[in-house]
Every structure is written in structure tokens, then in C-alpha cells.
Image (cartoon, rainbow, N blue to C red):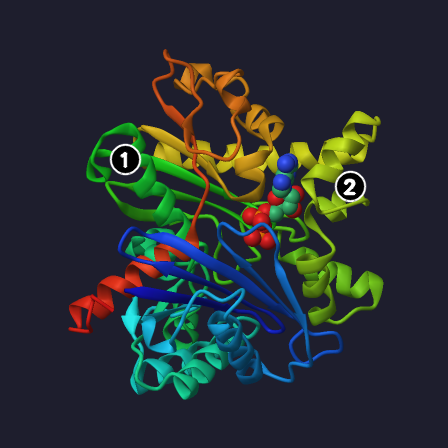
């Protein structure tokens, strides 16, 4: 069965086609600037060097989906002869509230739940829904599966997800910690178990998804018991442009001093804070590394703040799980920034966490990067959220009796 994976943002649509017989990626693509001037579709057929770039007006997500289908079917740069070859479509959906702890086959009742969750993820769920609706219209007979960012974290115990605010706000508005990047945390935890040759159900892991957005999770015997993001993806670690957790009183203080509304201050915490805010130069860790080489002390401070927060969570989760078998680094920074991994793991030997500085030079492939005498295994594992979405989609479609031979 071939599975189409769709990840819709407000003005973008990322997609991949995977052949699930051997889980091989066939092509991937991106539609950018949907509903704006200069819309463009870029498609990369695996095994072909040149990317196909199509510049064409794309007014909305339905037009984008039509263009994606046309590109997939193209004789030269496409990978499908007939749309019938697509056995199922998997959609990344950010927020399922408390409703789903696993991926689900999409039907009208699921759509209703996703609509209800719009108020919890106003930036993310609406474009996710647009993508689902466009696909359902254009491929009405193909099973669609929703894979949620929040689902993996639904196993957290109440003491991890309840905020110490009046309980009625949880009852009335469902204000609680949800956590995000769940698909990535789950994927790398499963890979870590394979890499270590130990069942996931015998492991205590801390997974560090460090990208533009960043979060850390505590995974005990395969279940997430805590995670650093909260009600929204703004909390927890300091990130590229996001502040992470701050004293909430700062919001009112800044609003008053700077004559800004609450919304404007939240926008600053989302878009002008984090690495960008502290360094004053960039949210990109590559730029910051370069700035540090040139003696920029604020860039150095930003990176130290980042590492400090990651270490803080590693310490907390180590205690919470009463032990630790492995730490996993993943996503843009976690996979590539060897210096950041060094700073994070520096001087943790007494806790049995010893990074091997030579093995740490690895890039682009899964590896154990701790010293042989390290009690805790440190791993670098490239994330693959699309594969995870495709797997869930394939399994659900197959279990529902859809033809796996297609
Ligand atoms: P997201 O999916 O959240 O947008 P990614 O996981 O793709 O983010 O991570 C993007 C970040 O990864 C960039 O901001 C960049 O700072 C960092 N990054 C990518 N490559 C490197 C590298 N070679 N060295 C350091 N940081 C890197």
C-alpha cells in the first residue's frame, strides 16, 4: 500500500508518498505561500537529483491539494500512474484535546472533535482541517487517518498535567498540560529501544526534541509521564523565537511598561524571544555558533540559557522516573549541533551520563554517542514524523479491512 502523508500549515502544505511494503520514501514535496502572491510547489522524487519547482497561483488548500495530485501523477517527475494507488492518507493534526490518545480513522465525528479543539490550537487545527477537507473532497473513497501531536502525551498522570490554578478552569475550559511533538518523541523512543536492543517497556528514557520548537519528554516503560510543553507550545524550553516558561507576571508588567496589549506581549513571547530575543541576532543555532566564534557574548549567553533549560528538565525527569537508561537527542539542533550536545551533557558524570566527544561528532544517522563506561546511553536519532504518520495510517487502514495489496 502507498500512503500519502499530509502536513498542512496556514500557508503551506508538506507531503510525502511512502511505499509501505518496505517503508520506502518515494517522493516529498512542499507547497508554499498558499493564498499569497508567488505560490510555489516543489517536489523531490527520491533517487532523482533535480527538484521540480512549479510556480503557479494557489488560492487555497483545495487548489494546493489539486496541484499536489497533479504533481504526483505527472509522467516525468511524478511517482504515481493512478491516484488509486494511494491506499490511505495520513494527516498530521496538532491538537486532539483529551479526546484521542491514539491515531484514528477520520469520519464526521472526528471532524467535529477537531473543530471543538480549534480554540485550543487556533493557529494549527484550522489549516489541518482545511487539508483534511480538501483531501476528502478530492479523494472521497480513500481512508484518511488523523495522527495527533498531543496523543502520545495523553498517558501523563494528573500530577503532571494539572496546573496549580483553580480546578474549575480545567473543568470548564480544559486548561491543562497537553504537550506537543508527540509523534517525534514516540518515534525516537521506539528507535532508541531498537538501537539499545532492549524492550521499550524495560526502559526509562528522556527524549529531547530540539528544533526551532523544542520539548523534552520523560518516557517510562513506553509511556510518556511528563513533557515540557504545556497548554500551548510556548512553554518549557527556551526555543528559536519562543520564550519557553516565564513568570506569568512578566506579561502584565511588560504590557504596562511598553503600552502593549496582552496579545502583543504574547506575540513577543512567541516570535521575538528565545534565542533571537536573548542574542539579538538570530534564532538559528548555526548563526549563533558562528557569532560565538566571533566573540559575541550575547549569542553565547543565549546558547547557555538554552542548554541550562534542557539540563533542568533532564534532572527533573531523571528524578521523576527514579532512574534513567537513555537520553535521546533529535530534530534540527539535537541532530546536528554537536557543540550544544556537549554543553548539555557537560559534567554529568556523577549521574552516570558521560558523552563520548569523538562519537558525538556523528551526523545524519542513528548512533550511541556516550562513552562505554556511561551508565546512561546517550543517543542521536534523526526524527521521522512522516514515517510514524504513515505507519499509523497504514496499520489503521489495514485493520479496517482496506486492501493492503494496493
Ligand atoms: P522545526 O521543524 O521546529 O522548524 P527543525 O527541527 O528543522 O525545526 O530545526 C531547525 C533548527 O535546527 C534551525 O533553527 C537550526 O538552528 C538548527 N540546525 C540545523 N542544522 C544545524 C547545524 N548543522 N548546526 C546547528 N544547528 C542546526
Q: Is the residue at mark 1 in contact range of ligand 1, meaning its CB lies under 8 Å from it?
A: no
Nearer to me, 403 or 15:
403
Residue lying at the far top in this picture: please name it. Answer: 373
Question: Does residue 93 appear in the picture of this structure?
Answer: no
The CA distance from mark 2 to mark 1 is: 38 Å
Asked which secondary structure carries label 2, the reply is helix
In the image, residue 194 sits, relative to residue 229, either above or below, namely: above
Asked if the residues shown at circle 2 and circle 1 are in contact, with their CB atoms under 8 angstroms apart, the answer is no
The x and y percentages for residue 324 are 33, 29
Q: Which residue is mark 1?
A: 194
Position above or below: 353 against 152: above
Q: Position of residue 197 (x, y in %)?
A: 24, 29
Q: Position of residue 95 (x, y in %)?
A: 43, 68
Mark 2 surroundings within 10 Å by alpha-carbon count, few (fewer than 14), some (14 through 19), many (20 or more): many
Query: Dot 1: few (<14), some (14–19), or many (≥20) neighbours within 10 Å?
Result: few
Secondary structure beneath dot 1 equals helix
Q: Quadrant of residue 135?
A: bottom left
Q: Residue at x 25, y 69 (%)?
A: 406
Q: Residue furthest front?
A: 75
Percent x, y of residue 315: 45, 31
Q: Is 156 on the left or on the right of 124, as rendered?
A: left
> Which residue sits at x=67%, y=64%?
266
Residue at position x 66%, y 32% in the image: 304
Q: Which is more foreground, mark 2 or mark 1?
A: 1
Residue picked out by circle 2: 279
Quadrant location of the N terminus?
bottom left
Q: In the picture provided, is 325 more to the left or to the right than 368?
A: left
Amino acid at each position: 500500500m502507498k500512503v500519502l502523508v499530509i502536513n498542512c500549515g496556514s500557508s503551506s502544505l508538506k507531503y510525502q508518498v511512502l511505499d509501505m511494503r518496505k517503508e520506502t520514501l518515494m517522493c516529498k514535496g512542499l507547497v508554499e505561500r498558499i493564498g499569497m502572491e508567488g505560490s510555489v510547489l516543489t517536489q523531490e522524487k527520491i533517487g532523482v537529483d533535480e527538484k521540480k519547482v512549479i510556480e503557479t497561483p494557489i488560492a487555497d488548500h483545495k487548489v494546493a491539494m489539486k496541484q499536489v495530485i497533479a504533481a504526483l501523477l505527472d509522467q516525468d517527475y511524478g511517482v504515481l500512474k493512478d491516484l488509486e494507488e494511494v491506499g490511505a492518507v495520513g494527516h498530521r493534526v496538532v491538537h486532539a484535546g483529551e479526546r484521542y490518545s491514539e491515531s484514528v480513522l477520520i469520519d464526521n465525528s472526528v471532524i467535529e472533535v477537531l473543530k471543538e479543539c480549534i480554540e485550543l490550537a487556533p493557529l494549527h487545527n484550522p489549516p489541518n482541517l482545511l487539508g483534511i477537507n480538501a483531501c476528502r473532497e478530492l479523494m472521497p473513497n480513500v481512508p484518511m487517518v488523523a495522527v495527533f501531536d498531543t496523543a502520545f502525551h495523553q498517558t501523563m498522570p494528573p500530577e503532571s498535567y494539572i496546573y496549580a490554578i483553580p480546578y474549575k478552569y480545567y473543568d470548564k475550559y480544559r486548561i491543562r498540560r497537553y504537550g506537543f511533538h508527540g509523534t517525534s518523541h514516540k518515534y525516537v523512543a521506539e528507535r532508541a529501544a531498537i538501537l539499545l536492543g532492549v524492550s521499550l517497556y524495560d526502559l526509562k528514557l528522556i527524549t529531547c526534541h530540539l528544533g526551532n520548537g523544542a520539548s523534552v519528554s520523560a518516557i517510562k516503560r513506553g509511556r510518556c509521564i511528563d513533557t515540557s510543553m504545556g497548554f500551548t507550545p510556548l512553554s518549557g524550553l527556551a526555543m528559536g523565537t519562543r520564550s519557553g516558561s516565564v513568570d506569568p507576571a512578566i506579561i502584565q508588567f511588560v504590557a504596562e511598561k511598553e503600552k502593549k496589549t496582552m496579545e502583543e506581549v504574547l506575540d513577543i513571547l512567541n516570535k521575538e524571544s528565545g534565542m533571537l530575543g536573548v542574542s539579538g541576532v538570530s534564532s538559528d543555532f548555526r548563526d549563533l555558533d558562528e557569532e560565538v566564534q566571533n566573540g559575541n557574548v550575547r549569542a553565547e549567553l543565549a546558547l547557555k540559557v538554552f542548554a541550562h533549560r534542557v539540563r533542568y528538565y533532564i534532572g527533573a525527569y531523571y528524578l521523576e522516573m527514579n532512574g534513567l537508561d537513555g537520553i535521546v537527542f533529535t530534530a534540527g539542533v539535537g541532530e546536528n549541533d554537536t557543540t550544544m550536545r556537549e554543553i548539555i551533557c557537560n559534567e554529568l558524570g556523577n549521574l552516570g551520563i558521560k558523552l563520548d566527544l569523538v562519537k558525538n561528532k556523528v551526523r545524519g544517522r542513528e548512533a550511541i554517542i556516550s562513552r562505554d563506561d556511561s551508565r546512561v546511553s546517550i543517543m542521536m536519532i534523526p526524527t521521522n514524523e512522516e514515517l510514524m504518520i504513515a505507519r499509523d495510517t497504514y496499520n489503521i487502514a489495514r485493520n479496517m479491512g482496506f486492501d493492503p495489496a494496493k
